[in-house]
Image: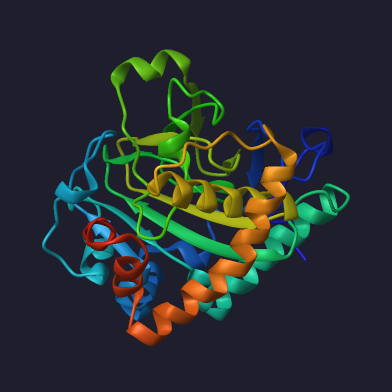
């Protein structure tokens, strides 16, 4: 099989690297990323797996995100002039994209001696962006290779441990929370600026805050994500910390108290199935959030 992604072995020394590094790939001319194929994919996905909008800023308020007035398929077909940003989520639901995702992560695992590219929670996302548009400041709760297929962009990437950039509270997860984070222009002095062209990619560490400025051409990027045991543990810890804060209980960072960390992860393992069962019984996430946290969380989830 043709090697789709190239990872330098000396780039990876642990299953969950804390710093970004560059990779290369051979997806720039792949037929799955032609706009016609992406338009058909956008039309086939459920509405909750397609997110798109009009022009936005790095500090975009998710409650004020503008619409572009088009359908997902039309957005892709008119992306040159649409002034839009779009993400097609969980495209591994399509067998062709799943095969490509698996091939890439299997090759990462092979090249890193099994350290990276594990089989846990593999997912794939495709970003389609108009010239000059922006992906707002946010962080993602997965390990991620962002592979640039068409066009170019600049990523401003920040240290996830820098609490002057993102507070512990803002970094935490809870059901219904939007991924966008508060941003200030002064943050840029601390950014690592990554410029990526077709055939290039970057590893984005879990919870690393970033925003993206697209170049002067249409951009298509393929994001392949996965988890390790350690990253799953961080996500669980984050959810429990956020829940306890909502009940007025200040929380420490991960690692501050290993015993408490273990208890929080154990609590998540017990409570998450309960939440999922309640969500199923009451008819959805919004009603479950109202039962657990009150009506404010329903409004936040809707936003």
Toward the left, the furthest residue is: 69
Residue drawn 51% across and 77% down?
93
The answer to which of 253 and 111 lies nearer the viewer is 253
- Which image quarter is the N terminus in? bottom right
The answer to which of 6 and 212 lies nearer the viewer is 212
For residue 25, side relative to residue 106 (left or right)? left
Query: Is residue 99 at least partly visible in the picture?
Result: yes
Residue drawn 68% across and 67% down?
102
The answer to which of 71 and 248 lies nearer the viewer is 248
Where is residue 199? Give x, y as percent: 57, 44
The answer to which of 238 and 64 lies nearer the viewer is 238
Residue drawn 47% across and 48% down?
244
Q: Is residue 145 above or below residue 202?
A: below
Based on the displayed image, in which of its 4 quarters is residue 296 positioned? bottom left
Toward the right, the furthest residue is: 113
Residue drawn 47% across and 44% down?
172
Toward the front, the furthest residue is: 248
Where is residue 34? Give x, y as percent: 42, 63
Q: Is residue 106 above or below residue 140?
A: below
Based on the displayed image, in which of its 4 quarters is residue 105 positioned? bottom right
Q: Is residue 136 above or below residue 46?
A: above
Q: How many marks?
A: 0
For residue 260, side relative to residue 244 (left or right)? right
Q: Is residue 101 above or below residue 138?
A: below
For residue 124, side relative to residue 110 (left or right)? left
- Which image quarter is the C terminus in? bottom left
């Amino acid at each position: 099989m043709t090697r789709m992604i190239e990872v330098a072995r000396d780039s990876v020394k642990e299953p969950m690297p804390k710093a970004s590094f560059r990779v290369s790939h051979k997806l720039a001319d792949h037929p799955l990323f032609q706009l016609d194929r992406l338009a058909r994919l956008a039309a086939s996905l459920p509405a909750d797996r397609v997110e798109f909008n009009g022009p936005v800023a790095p500090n975009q308020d998710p409650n004020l995100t503008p619409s572009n007035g088009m359908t997902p398929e039309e957005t892709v077909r008119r992306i040159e002039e649409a002034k839009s940003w779009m993400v097609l989520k969980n495209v591994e639901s399509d067998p062709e994209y799943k095969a490509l995702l698996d091939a890439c992560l299997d090759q990462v695992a092979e090249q890193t001696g099994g350290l990276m590219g594990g089989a846990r929670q593999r997912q794939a996302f495709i970003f389609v962006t108009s010239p000059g548009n922006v992906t707002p400041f946010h962080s993602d709760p997965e390990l991620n290779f962002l592979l640039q297929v068409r066009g170019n962009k600049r990523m401003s990437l920040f240290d996830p441990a820098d609490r002057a950039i993102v507070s512990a509270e803002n970094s935490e997860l809870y059901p219904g929370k939007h991924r966008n984070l508060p941003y200030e222009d002064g943050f840029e002095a601390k950014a690592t600026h990554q410029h990526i062209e077709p055939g290039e990619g970057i590893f984005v560490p879990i919870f690393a805050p970033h925003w993206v400025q697209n170049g002067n051409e249409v951009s298509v990027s393929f994001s392949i994500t996965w988890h390790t045991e350690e990253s799953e543990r961080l996500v669980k810890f984050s959810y429990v910390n956020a829940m306890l804060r909502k009940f007025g209980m200040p929380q420490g960072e991960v690692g501050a108290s290993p015993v408490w960390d273990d208890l929080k992860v154990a609590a998540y393992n017990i409570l998450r199935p309960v939440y999922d069962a309640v969500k199923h019984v009451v008819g959805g996430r919004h009603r479950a959030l109202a039962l657990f946290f009150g009506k404010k969380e329903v409004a936040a989830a809707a936003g």
